[in-house]
Amino acid sequence: MLNELAEATTVYLVTGYTDMRKGIDGLAEIVNGKLQLSPYSKALFLFCGKNSRKMKGLYWEGDGFLLL
């Protein structure tokens, strides 16, 4: 599981503030809508909250999402 995450070839840092109350579906919609990318790609998507100490990550493992 986490070994595959270390092999993610692309990391995207989503600019702007993201509502940290969003779950997997909301974050996947941001990836699809704002970035025009597939959330099912082998990439790690990082989201920043308004408080710079909070971040969330979204990664597709093949059978489900990993929310970090």
Image (spheres, rainbow, N blue to C red):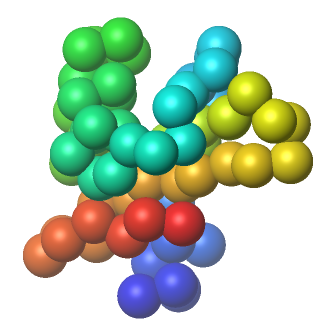
Please say if 22 is above or below 68: above
Indicate the quadrant where residue 52 lies: top right
Q: How many dots with numbers?
A: 0
Left or right: where does residue 2 sit relative to residue 33? Answer: right
**Residue 68, image x and y in percent?**
54, 66
Please say if 24 is above or below 50: below
- Can residue 30 be seen here? yes
Task: Give 27 or 6, whichever is nearer the viewer.
Answer: 27
Please say if 61 is above or below 39: below
> In the rendered image, which quarter contains the N terminus?
bottom left
- Can residue 7 be seen here? no
What residue sits 39% from the left and 43% below the top? 22
Task: Give 5 or 14, whichever is nearer the viewer.
Answer: 14
**Residue 42, image x and y in percent?**
35, 53
Q: Identify the residue at the far left of this view.
A: 63
Indicate the quadrant where residue 13 lies: top right
What residue sits 53% from the left and 86% below the top? 3
Left or right: where does residue 51 sit relative to residue 40? Answer: right
What residue sits 75% from the left and 49% below the top? 54
Please say if 43 is above or below 35: below
**Residue 47, image x and y in percent?**
59, 37
What residue sits 34% from the left and 28% below the top? 31
**Residue 23, image x and y in percent?**
34, 51
